[in-house]
Structure formats: structure tokens, C-alpha cells
Amino acid sequence: MAGMRLAPVVFLRAAPLHSFMAGKRNFMGTKHPFVLNIQANLISRQLSDLSFRRIRVATQQDINRLYPLLVAYIQNPALASTVTELVIDISTSGCRYYQDRDSTPVAAGPEKVAAHAQLEDHTRALGLGSDATTFMQHSLSWKFNPQLPPANPYSDPQHPPANKYYSHGIGDRPNSIRGFANVAATLLLSLCPNIQLLHMYELGYSPPLQDFLIRNNYGRLPAAHLRRLERVHLQSWDARDNREYDHLEFLDYFRFFGRLPALRTYSADCVAEFQPAREVAPPGSAHGVTRISIANADVSGDMLGTIIRVPRALEEFTLSLGGLTYNKGGTALVNPKTLGKCLLEQKGTLKSLDLDVAAIIGSHKEEAEEQMDDNDYGKDEYFRLDEQAGNGRPLRSFDLPNTRRYGLTIGSLHDFEALEHLAISVDLMLGPRVWHDGMMRRVIPPPFRLVDALPRTLK
């Protein structure tokens, strides 16, 4: 059902590391071949118990089981190589229902102290800077040491709000369930080299994870991560009612993944646009993305136009608007001309176009495109890097030249020389119908004949 949270394919099962370590120690200290064989089989079975294809970081039960898994991966990197799919849902809307304290703290022991030190060394080696590193190490220590106090809802004198890592809500502090989930997700992304599919829900305020993703995407870390990531799937949910969807910062995820060498697919489901922090992105700046799919969504025409133009060479675009209720109310409207002008920028490479937006076409009369102020808000160093990598085309769709007549339509597609598959409503192609003189009819005819508006390459 649309809007429902993803069910786990594989549950996290953390084998007791003290058993593994004791078995390894006995194995090294014994001489008898029969005992050697038993211990070797025991170690092999325990290692196989920690080999997963898919890991989910979402529920409190998931998060409580992450620390032993991180220890296993830091001590045996080969175990992490089996992970090809990762689900991350640490959204504020869901985590607000978590308990303040993890019920399964890690018991200290000589081997575990050494393993914890390895995790801290790895955290420092990520190169995220002193603030992020301190946050992550504080969170790991809180998870490891049951004597550390839980997050205080009124103040935290040990860590005053001196920077963005400590100045937000108390539920986002390092000594909280969501804070640790943030850190654990970051470490999983850095430890698992073969992730191909990443499911992500709106991150909200997650500075360590967001900093890791954006720095990794722009090559600002000592080591490169997520080199085999092929697909990013975005989704939202409302913890109070799964018939509703929540908002998503669509353009942020191009900044998180748009430059990764293997990424080809950007998809989103059950998501909405609401007062986005970023309204524009340099066209042509995502060189590898060739497929975009957005379903069950509530997105304005201007945002859709920006998303369409971010890839350098878009080959497939699928859009289906509506389906759920947006929890903040309202419905975005789409101007067909805006879609048409932005799709025209991809006419040389677009092979498949599937549009289901007829129900929310913005007007039944010809109107000018909405003009918006082009200010410097959000144009940081990463935006400037994308500008350098882009194609130099205008940021806003209304600044694109009008090379054809549109009327109330998406415009003629006759010169889309690569287009082979087309699924589109007649109203989007020829204009909307209204009730007139006792019947539904088009009061404004399209500026072309349908037969002349279709490309010859269609199959």
C-alpha cells in the first residue's frame, strides 16, 4: 500500500561477539586438531550469521542492534561487503516516539574496549571535521557505556549549544536514540562498499549524516564511499496516519548523490514539496543520472522543471501526481508549458516519458509562467561547483526561450528524436476540457494537430 513503511527483508541479528572472541582466543591457544576443527566451524557459523544483503535502520529495535553489527564490520571488513541494500529512516516524525534511552547498553570487556577504540579510530579517519567527529564519538560512547547519562530535556551542561551539532532539539543530541541512529547510519555507509540501492526517508535535521553525504559526493573526504551506488529511492511517511505523506527536500539529494559514478536512478514515492530550502539547482550538473521516477507525489511545476533539468542526459522520466493526502494541506498545481519547456531541454536523449498529471493541470486559460526572484539564498560552495559542472542554461524555466506555441498543452513533441515510449493523458497533450454548453469540451484548441505533435521514433 502506498505510504506504508518498508517491511524488512532481513532482520538485524547480531551474534554475541563475546562468544566469537572467546572462540577465536581458544582456537589460537589449542593444539588438538579435532578442537581446531570445531572452533573453526564455530567461527565460520558466527561470521555467516552477520552476513546480510539488506539492513534497515528505522525502528528502535533496529537501532538497538546496530552497535554489535558495527563492531563486527570494523573488525571483519569482509562481512560488510555482502550488504547491497540499505534502508535509512531516522526522520523526526518517526523518532519522536522512541524511548529516551536504549534498553540494551553494551557491557564492557577487554575485547569490547579494543573494538570500541577501533570504531573511534574509524570515525576520526572519515575526515568530517572536529565538530562532527566529537558528536559521533560522544554518541558511540553513550551507546557503549551504560553509566553515561541520557539526554536531558532541559539542558546538557557537558555539551552546551556551541555549534550546529548541539544547538538543535534534544532528541537530536548524540546521547539519544535518534542521535545514535544518525551516527550508525553514517558508519554503515562508510563501512559497506557494495551498496547498490539506498532507500531514504526525509532526514530532517541530521548533520553528521548529511555532512558525510555531501562531502563524499563532492570528493571532500580522504576516502571515496558509495562508489557502487546505482539507485536512490526517496520516500516519506507520517507516523500519525499512513494515508498521508510528508514533505521532502528534493534538490538536497542531488547534492548528496548526483556526482557518484555508478548512480543512474533517482526515484521518489509518497512525497510532497513544502517551502523548500532550495528552489533551484544548476541544470546539467548530475552527469550520471539517466532515470527519474516520482509517484504519488505533490510537487509544483517549477520544482518538477528543475528536477527534470538537473541530469545532464535524461533518458527516462515517470511522473504520477496525487494518491495520498498531504499532511499540511493544499495541492500544488502544474503549468503544462513549464513541463514542456523543461522536457524540451532533454529532447536529444529522452527515450521514455510517462506523465500522469491531468488531474492537477493548473489552469483552463492561457497564463504566463510564474516568475520568481533569483536571489543568492542557498548558493553555497557546492552550488558553485555544480554551476561549473553544469551546462550553463538558465536556472529558472521562465527564462528558457519560447521556441514553439504551447497554448494550454505540454507542446509539440515532434522533434524529440530519441523518444520511443510515450504515456500521456490527452488533456495534457491537447489541453484541458471544461463543461461548456452541456458537454465537456476544449474551449481553447491546441496550436497543433495531434498527428503532427508526435515523434516518428515512437514504438
Image (cartoon, rainbow, N blue to C red):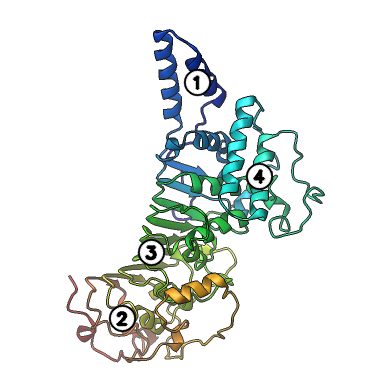
Select label 2 or label 4 by which is in front: 4
Q: Mark 3 falls on what kind of element?
A: strand
On residue 293, the disc is: 3
| Residue type, mark 4 in image | Gln
Q: Which residue is mark 1?
A: 24
Q: Earlier in the sequence, mark 2 or mark 1?
A: 1
Sequence-first disc among 2 and 3: 3
Q: CA distance from mark 3 to mark 4?
A: 38 Å
Q: Mark 1 to mark 4: distance in Å? A: 28 Å
3D distance between C-alphas at marks 2 and 3: 20 Å
Q: Residue at x 51, y 45 (%)?
A: 188
Q: Nearer the viewer, residue 293 or 27?
A: 27
Q: Residue at x 41, y 87 (%)?
A: 400
Q: Residues within 10 Å of mark 2 (few under 14, many from 20)?
A: many
In front: label 2 or label 1: 1
**Mark sitting earlier along the chain (2/4):** 4
